[in-house]
Amino acid sequence: MIIDILSLFPHYFTGPFDESIIKRAKENGLAEIRLTDIRDFSENRHRKVDDRPYGGGPGMVMMAEPVVNAIRHVKTSEAHVVYLSPQGKVLTAAKSRQLSKEKHLILLCGHYEGIDQRILDLEVDEEISIGDYVLTNGCLAAIVLVDAVLRFVPGVLGHEHAADEDSFENGILDCPHYTRPEVFEGLAVPTVLLGGNHKEIANWRKDQALKKTMNTRPDLLKFIIKD
Ligand code: 4GX
């Protein structure tokens, strides 16, 4: 998968994408992440990419010309263009899995008060939000999206089924996990996990996951009728 990230701060991404699982995915050729500085596409001699909003109001808006030129510079016939914004549909595991099937993702990171609407009209396929809060810019949202999507690209996680067992894959939260020691500061591992009865363990985990979901995210249970 090729991922192009268009932003005003290409250096924002060097830390997160050069560690751990994403680093390994890049080294193994499973993901190529390319960073583009939108300022390189400004026609202005001061590399200006923003201007005052028509109709007035506070803040600045990213201008159509440099952003559209930057997108067109990296765009291929297979590209799927995403704008990260609080106005988008909220990112889910299902959407992340869907995006993991794309050959070429272009992620546009907004700055200031947003971007000229004509960029969306002309070049953007979908608008995605990582949650109902406002960040200072779209770079962190792009990092979150890349991380959530790459986990579903075959080979990125060590063991192929790891992504299937996670929270949300069954529409509910995950069960609690334990590792050694058996007792930590007086708290014992539930005995069912020590017994080796796989059916009993599976039942216990399902029960715990449901209880956790009921307490923390009852909204997730609204549409679920399952064995
Ligand atoms: N999930 N931001 C976009 C610029 C902006 C402001 C207003 C459109 C309208 C965000 C999020 C997010 C900060 C990225 C504001 N664009 N992105 N940016 N939540 O907060 O994705």
Image: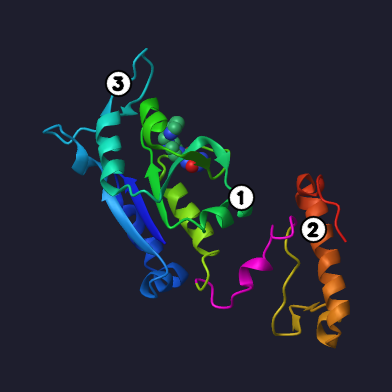
Question: Does 164 lie within the magenta span?
Answer: yes
Q: Quadrant of the N terminus?
A: bottom left
- Magenta residues (range): 156-172
Q: Residue at x 43, y 71 (%)?
A: 25
* Direction front: furthest residue: 77
- The residue furthest top is 55
Residue 135 in view of the camera: no
Quadrant in the picture for residue 184: bottom right
**Pointer 2 local density, CA inside 10 Å: few below 14, some 14–19, many at least 20:** some
Which residue, given by chain and number where applicable, does mark 1 sit on? 92
Q: Distance of mark 2 from mark 3, alpha carbons?
A: 48 Å
Marker count (numbered)? 3
| Residue 21 screen position, x and y as percent | 47, 71
**What residue do we see at 77% from left, 44% from top?**
219
Residue 192 position within the rendered picture, expressed as x and y whole percent measured from the top left: 86, 80
Residue 102 image point, x, y percent: 47, 55
Q: Nearer the viewer, mark 1 or mark 2?
A: 1
Q: Which residue is under mark 2?
A: 212
- Residue behind mark 3: 52
